[in-house]
Amino acid sequence: MPRAPRKSQSDYLSWPSLSGIPFSPDSIPYRNIAGQIAVAIRQAIANGKLPPGSRLLEMKIALAMGISRGPLREALFQLEREGLVVRKPNRGRFVVGLTEDLARQIASLRGVLEGFAASLAVKRMTEEDFRRIEAIIGEMSSMARVGDFPGMVECDYRFHACIMQASGHPLLFEMWAGLDRKIRIYLSALNRMYGDMDSVVKGHVAILQALRKRDPKRASRIMSDHMVEVLEPFVTTILRSLKTAGPNDSTAANDVPSSTYATTRRGKPNSESRYE
């Protein structure tokens, strides 16, 4: 039996109606709204407004954002796939909790990737690169003086991103950027509860000094040591104290201010994160 001739793309484009197709162009803006909702929640997690363990109650979020629960659920599924949100049977969804094991995994992996990047960057960094990093450290000092924890998180990210980019290794940067969201949860929780922000600044000054010496081994070691120096106080004084106090997923959605989810009525965040 002869086969029917295959239709070309132009044949489909010339169809008089799309009524027989099992999808609608309306799905495109719907997905855009879901993506915007994900950006807003992701940003609230990154800047510490939704700390690890916070419960995400659909009804509260939908009312605060002025959206329906359909695109919200899609956004939450997306965040689950990214590892930022966890669903617990009969309890709902929560911002992923920080455990000692997860914190050590993140810090050790950062140490390897960023230590290697620092060893490459020392050979390539220009005076403009150094001035950019010095300016970021200046901003970090200002954040430390006023106790601006979210601002410190943002500066920290920019500092390390500059070094990763200066390594001249696009694949390395891509791998590191893939950890971005989990790294920022870790940094957000760390800096919101870190007692001495000045020591954070000093740690970054030491990295800059190592880079200026143009010694790849020294730069790699200082960068890796920085990860350990940040990790140990975090694990010993924060995570273990939280473990003693009780599970870190007890924060209820009702305790999260409605302004955390503030968006327009179409679900568009007031300011989208540029790391989305």
Image (spheres, rainbow, N blue to C red):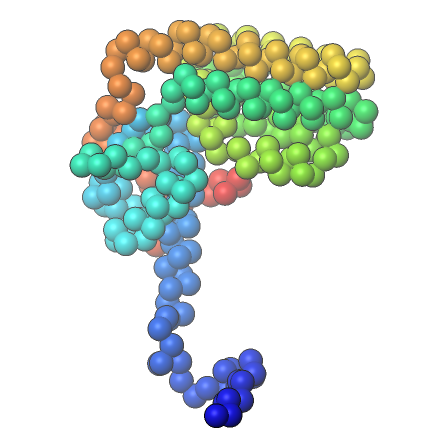
Q: Residue at x 39, y 32 (%)?
A: 45
Foreground pick, 90 / 182: 90
Residue 140 coordinates in the image, percent (x, y): 57, 19
Q: Is residue 159 visible?
A: no
Query: As displayed, is residue 1 above or below residue 48?
Result: below
Q: Is residue 234 visible?
A: yes
Residue 113 coordinates in the image, percent (x, y): 63, 26
State how many labels appear: 0
Query: As displayed, is residue 181 above or below residue 221?
Result: below
- Asked whether, in this view, residue 203 is left or right of residue 2, the answer is right
Q: Residue furthest front?
A: 1
Q: Residue furthest bottom?
A: 1
Q: Residue at x 29, y 33 (%)?
A: 94
Query: As displayed, is residue 145 above or below residue 150?
Result: above
Q: Residue 259's image quarter?
A: top left
- Asked whether, in this view, residue 36 is left or right of residue 107, the answer is left
Q: Residue at x 40, y 42 (%)?
A: 81
Residue 234 coordinates in the image, percent (x, y): 44, 12
Residue 20 coordinates in the image, percent (x, y): 36, 81
Foreground pick, 21 / 51: 21
Q: Residue furthest left?
A: 90
Q: Residue at x 21, y 44 (%)?
A: 59
Query: As displayed, is residue 25 above or below residue 10?
Result: above
